[in-house]
Amino acid sequence: CHLHFSLWNEDGANIFAQSLGDKEKGVYLSNSSDTRNILSDDAHFFMAGILHHLPGLTALFCASRASYSRLAPSSWSGPFQAWGLNNREVCLRVPASRTGISNVEIKIVDHTSNPYLAIGSIIACGLDGIRRKLNLPEGYDVDPATLSESDQPARLPGSLEEALRHMEDDGVIVEAMGKGLWSCYNVIKKAHAMRFRGNECLSDIAALY
């Protein structure tokens, strides 16, 4: 489970990270909402694009009905539509150390996903964020489940059917996949969800393996 990614330019440089001087290193360890000194503008835009499209992306990242049993609060699975530095309880985690930042982790991606579709959709949605210069909301440095309901970020889809509805409404994902591939994926996954509706995970496992 989980997928780590970074964005590199034609010169082989990681464009997510800002160049840090000795005095700047470690600042982010005490303040998860202050990222302008450690993440580039393109990193903010790219992450904002992924966050914006996460409800639809969930259908690609969590491709089985059984996947949604794992997306529970306070279990390091990242079921909230939020990000944070070194926060394992949000979907988009930015691992940080005193040597800097090199990648971003999406925690909800599991073994049922097609890696080509997962990575391709990440690129499409992240670049959409860069093109539109989407604003990255404030990050979380606590488990969102411990906050009051009014202060919690949005929960990600709780079922494959719900995630497929979001994907169907997301023009960026549909365009990136192409109408033919998207239509086939949508039909197959809806049939999968309907077949196992109301059944236990063991039935799911028996049919798949």
Image (spheres, helix red, strand yellow):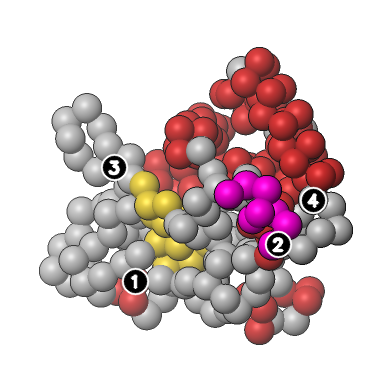
What is the spatial separation of the Cα atoms under label 4 and label 3, in whole angstroms?
43 Å
Circle nearer the N terminus (2, 1): 1
> Which residue is denoted by mark 4 in the rendering?
196
Decide which of tag 4 and tag 2 comes sooner along the chain.
Answer: 4
The answer to whether residue 11 shows anywhere in this view is yes
Alpha carbon separation for disc pair 4 and 2: 8 Å
Please identify the dominant SS of the magenta region.
helix
Q: Confirm or deny contact between disc 2 and disc 1 (CB under 8 A).
A: no
The picture places residue 137, in percent across and down from the top left corner, at 58, 57
Rendered image: mark on residue 156: none
Q: Which residue is mark 3?
A: 15
Residue furthest left as drawn:
22
Question: Which residue is denoted by mark 1 in the rendering?
Answer: 28
Instruction: Quote the CA–CA distance across marks 3 and 2.
Output: 41 Å
Dividing the picture into quadrants, the one containing residue 99 is bottom left
The residue labelled by disc 2 is 201
Task: Give the amino acid type for the residue marked by disc 2 in the picture.
Answer: Cys
Specify whether residue 33 is in view.
no
First to last magenta residue range: 202-209
The residue carrying pointer 2 sits among few (fewer than 14), some (14 to 19) or many (20 or more) residues within 10 Å by Cα, namely few
